[in-house]
Image (spheres, rainbow, N blue to C red):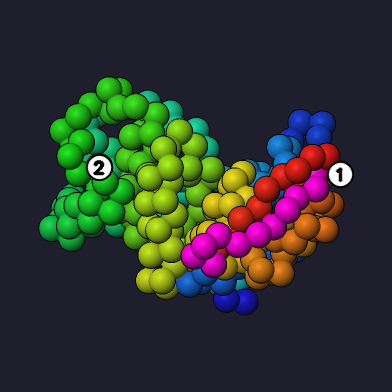
Amino acid sequence: MNGLQASAVSLTLGRRTVLYGVDLGFARGRVTALLGPNGAGKSSLLACLAGLRTPDSGTATIDGEVIAALDGRMRGRRIGLLPQSGEVHWNVDVTTLVGLGRLPHRGRFGETEADRAAVERAMAATDVAHLADRAVERLSGGERGRVLLARVLAGEPEWLLADEPLASLDPAHQIDVLERLREVARAGAGVIVVLHDLNQAARVADDVVLLRDGHVVATGEAQAVLTAPLLAETYGVTVEIGRASDGRRFIVPLGRA
């Protein structure tokens, strides 16, 4: 089956089951937001889809191939992951760090002109070109987050998986990152993003998956899923949904349901 698929995926970490028989399909060319309260299983599902965790039962596949069975180089070409943690364990400059996103593509002769061009495009797209020579340890949290996104974009993956990419970003750069995700999807890749801000999800997502306690509450097009009853079921809060002057929907939590 084409696309990224989770088929009856269950996962236990320690003594806690974090995913229960999750069945989901994701399409290229679309942005899917994974939403839910803390501990819902969003990051665990993303890790299974990225091949970082192997489900205890069920399978995560890409175009019918089991993701965890792919060799690291092939998996890196096809799936790019922006993890929740912004930690960097190498004291290198920004250009070098972004260039690591090209490693799955490099042959025996090292960096090519195509690699350098991809790095430049990624840095320009994330507004970090002016930081090219700065040491990573001297970056702010928001700058580091944008540099790490640039590293993923430089790899030009078929699928971009991002775990809370808006953390530590100011509103202007949040909008910029969301637009980059939309551009990636418009170019034909699939984007799956974990978000906590319902309004940003309404802004960027074509599709939404609502998770609670390791179970899928609802999945479908954003307009159909981001409703007051489903959000109350997922988060345990009442919300008011309205429209801004430009027609975009906004969601205001009012209190516990």
Q: Is residue 238 left or right of residue 247?
A: right
Q: Is residue 185 left or right of residue 67?
A: left
Q: Residue at x 41, y 71 (%)?
A: 186
> What range is drawn magenta here?
237-247
- Label 1: few (<14), some or many (≥20) within 10 Å? few
Task: From the image, tell me which residue sits under label 1.
Answer: 257
Determine the secondary structure under disc 1. loop
The image position of residue 249, as x and y in percent, is 60, 61
Farthest residue to the bottom: give it. 1
The label number, if any, that marks residue 128 in the structure image: 2
The image position of residue 51, as x and y in percent, is 56, 51
Does residue 62 lie above or below 49 as drawn? Answer: below
Does residue 143 lie above or below 59 as drawn? Answer: above
- Could you tell me the amino acid type at mark 2? Val
Q: Main secondary structure of the magenta part?
A: strand
Q: Is residue 34 left or right of residue 148?
A: right
Quarter of the image with the N terminus is: bottom right
Q: Is residue 54 visible?
A: no
